[in-house]
Amino acid sequence: MVQNATTGARGSSVVTDETHRLIASDKVEGTAVYSPSGERIGEVYNFMVDKRSGRVAYAVMSFGGFLGIGQKYHPIPWQVLTYDTDLSGYVIDLDKETLKSAPSFAREEAPDWGSREWETHIHDYYRVPLYEGSF
Amino acid sequence: MVQNATTGARGSSVVTDETHRLIASDKVEGTAVYSPSGERIGEVYNFMVDKRSGRVAYAVMSFGGFLGIGQKYHPIPWQVLTYDTDLSGYVIDLDKETLKSAPSFAREEAPDWGSREWETHIHDYYRVPLYEGSF
């Protein structure tokens, strides 16, 4: 049970568990994201939690790059991701081609999370309303 | 910008950002938890997300131990944690002494997340109702 000191207590523990209803935050991170045809288009890098409501607002999907260089990050409203138990990953109605026009930012760019314009842009793209109490 | 291959793209990125409203999942993980008197009683290990509602159900606080050995995990309903900007951490109405009687599990134990009895026990302890749609 000795853990690697640099990675901490992450990864293999029973604590990072999942039930039919609940999933651990560090299990969502790293989960694959697929197009409807089953093409792997990226993975969940992390997700953004609304501090007041405790609701997950966005999953941030990372795509491409190598060791973080050239990687693109796509914020995706949580409600457009569907978990597929067969694929053991999330499915979203996008393919690699349309991903190019989806809202994204590069590693060196700071996304403007506090901006209504930026978040409206994301929600308009995915055609879902801004989440409750967002602004 | 070269990242450590074992830890991946975690840690120093602008992606792991925070605004007045949103916080990145991997920024919540590792955040200190304090008693009302300002005593540090642990840190957030991870948190459990309700897959259907996208709501954070529990923060799992880790306490004590060394490199995961002897560590105790305390599931805490999200709504009883208050973020304190001065402390840069969460505050909960517990001290180290009362923590001994709070619901917890050891590293070797699998918490019974799916069980109504276990979750009712947690919510009763913290005197908050079971969250909406939980069972």
Image (tube, coloured by chain):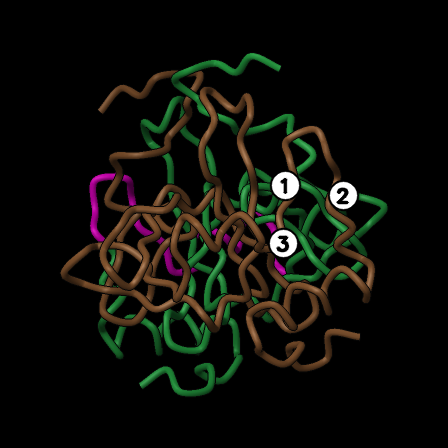
Chain colours: A brown, B green
Tell me the distance, in whole angstroms, between the alpha carbons under discs 3 and 2.
Answer: 31 Å
The residue at the point 78 percent across, 50 percent down is A112
Q: Dot 3 lies on which element?
A: loop
Does label 2 lie on the same chain as label 3? no
Q: Main secondary structure of the magenta part?
A: loop
- The residue pinned by badge 1 equals B32
Return the disc, 1 or 2, that comes first in the chain's sequence.
1
Q: Is residue A131 above or below residue B5?
A: below
The stretch drawn in magenta includes residue B126: no
Specify the quadrant that holds the N terminus of chain B: top right
Q: Position of residue A135 (x, y in %)?
A: 80, 75
Q: Chain of mark 1?
A: B
Q: Is residue A32 above or below residue A76?
A: above
Closer to us: A7 or A75: A75
Q: The residue under label 1 is which amino acid type?
A: Ala
Q: Residues within 10 Å of mark 2 (few under 14, many from 20)?
A: few
Q: Which residues are magenta?
A: B93-110
Q: Dot 1 lies on which element?
A: strand
Closer to us: A97 or A121: A97
Q: Is residue B84 above or below residue B64?
A: below
Disc 3 vs disc 2: which is toward the camera?
A: 3
> Does the residue at mark 1 contact the one at mark 2 (Cβ under 8 Å)?
yes
Give the numbered dot on residue B88. 2
Tell me the distance, in whole angstroms, between the alpha carbons under discs 1 and 2.
Answer: 8 Å
Closer to us: A96 or A1: A96
Specify the quadrant that holds the C terminus of chain B: bottom left
- The residue pinned by badge 3 equals A103
The residue at the point 25 percent across, 35 percent down is A12
The residue at the point 64 percent across, 77 percent down is A131
Tell me the distance, in whole angstroms, between the alpha carbons under discs 1 and 3.
Answer: 33 Å
